Every structure is written in C-alpha cells, then in structure tokens.
Image: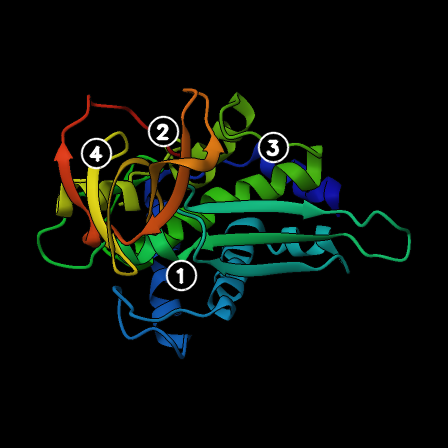
Amino acid sequence: MATDLRVHVETSELNASQVAARTRLIYNTMLRESPHFDGGNFATIHSSDLKRLFHQYDTSFFKAQIGATLGRTPLHFRLSKRMTRSAGQTARFTPANRSGRRFYEISVSMTLLFQCFAGDDHRPITATGLECHDRMEALQRVMEHELVHLIEVLLWTTSSCSVRRFQSIALRFFGHTTHTHELITPAERAFSEFGIKPGDSVRFHFKGGDYTGLVNRVTKRATVLVQDTRGRRHSDGNRYSTFYIPVESLKALRRAKQTGSDAR
C-alpha cells in the first residue's frame, strides 16, 4: 500500500480549478456533517472534527491511500491550547519497549485558530500562501500542511517543510506557495491590542503587591522577569523571579527596540 501512495504522490498534479472544487466540497461537507460547526467561523470544535476532515482529504485527494498505508497503526487527533506559534504539528511516537505500539498524531492549535476572525476588523489572514476567509478555510490549510508531513513520514521516515520535496507535494496537491502561516499569534495580539511585546518594561499587580519587570515572552500569558536576589540567575548575570501574567493586566513603561519573530 505504501508503494501505491508513493506512486500517487510522486506522479499526480492537480490544476487550480480541481483543487478549488475539491477543497470547497470538503468545506461544505464539514459544515453539513459536523455536529459542532455552526458556520465557517464556528465557535466550537472537537477532535472528532479533525478525524472527519482527515478522512475527507484522504478520500478526495489520495484515494484513501494514506489510511491504507497506515493500516492498523493508530492515527490520533488532538486540539492544543498550548501551541502558540505553530498552527499544526504531526508527530510519530515509537514506544521504548516492544510491548508498546507505534502511533501518529496530528495536532492543531486552538489558540491560533480562535484568535483569527474574532471580529470584523481583523487583518487579512493567510496560511500556506493562500488567503483564508474564515476559520474553516484556515483549518483546511493547516490540515493540508500536516497531511504532507504525515505522508513524508510514512513514505520517507523524515519530513521537513523547508525542503523541495515537501513543497512540491504541497504545491501539486493543494496549491500551497509557502510553508508558513500568518495566523494571529498571542504575541501579535498582545502588541496590537495592548501595546505589549517582549523586551518591554511593565508594571503589574499580583497578590496584593505591585511589581515592575521585563517581558521575556508572550504566549497565552506574558512571562515577566522581576529582579529578585533570591531568584534564578539569568544570562545577563542578574537574578529574577518569574511571573506569568495576563497581557491585559500589564502596563507598559518603556518601549523596547523592535524585535523579529518567526512562525512555522
């Protein structure tokens, strides 16, 4: 079965109209069949929706050969609240002992998905080089990207979206022109809504005390370092205590130099 999938992946190429027709059919089928979706900007999602979406893509684009290649090896689906930069992730788990069973897992970031399309004034959202008009389209682009990772792992053991083989598969099957996303991250939201970014000096109130510290990182909350002689020593030679504070509870005191960030 792996041979059949490999031949299909290496020799097939869809034109733009074929890709558009198939992805739109999947879009409409998901909205019709999922018990959790109430529209393209659905407010709830379940891991079973990821499983349903996988089967739609496997059938429509790969003649169900991904599932056939997996055989009896489990493929799990997970919605993550902790993924704050990567929109999706595909992993292979191999137990250390022989009694365990290998399995694969595709994860999708709920945090990034639901920070997009939260209002009418959001910036344009793109993923894999394609504009997304709602959460369903963004979810599709993420699943397409992760499917290419899964295919590469199944057929060639390793996968990297920065190499030519991955990009060729993603372009020929889905029309992807990049391997990155521009979904709204917690760090972007922190800056656009509250003017807070890593490197800023901030003031905050915590358990009856007022503190001043430095924003070290922004995920779902801001990681703030406060100088403390009893704290852990950092690379700058100072000792800090670490606080995890909601961004909306911080007040910026001084603007730091612009810093860049990357995203998968």
The CA distance from mark 1 to mark 4 is 47 Å
Q: Could you tell me residue 65's position as x and y percent? A: 65, 51
Residue 230 drawn above or below residue 22: above
Q: Secondary structure at mark 2?
A: loop
Which quadrant holds residue 201?
top left
Which corner quadrant of the image does residue 192 belong to? Answer: top left
For marks 1 and 2, give the CA distance.
Answer: 30 Å
Which quadrant of the figure has residue 27?
A: bottom left
Mark 2 highlights which residue? 262
For marks 4 and 3 on the same chain, the one whose residue lies earlier in the sequence: 3
Q: Nearer the viewer, mark 2 or mark 3?
A: 2
Inspect the image, locate mark 1, and give the three-letter code of the amino acid beneath it.
Ile
Graded by Cα atoms within 10 Å as few (under 14), some (14 to 19) or many (20 or more), the crowding at tag 2 reads few
Q: Residue at x 61, y 42 (%)?
A: 151
The amino acid sitting under disc 4 is: Ser
Residue corresponding to mark 4: 201
Q: Is residue 5 above or below residue 140?
A: above
Query: CA gap, disc 1 to disc 3?
Result: 25 Å
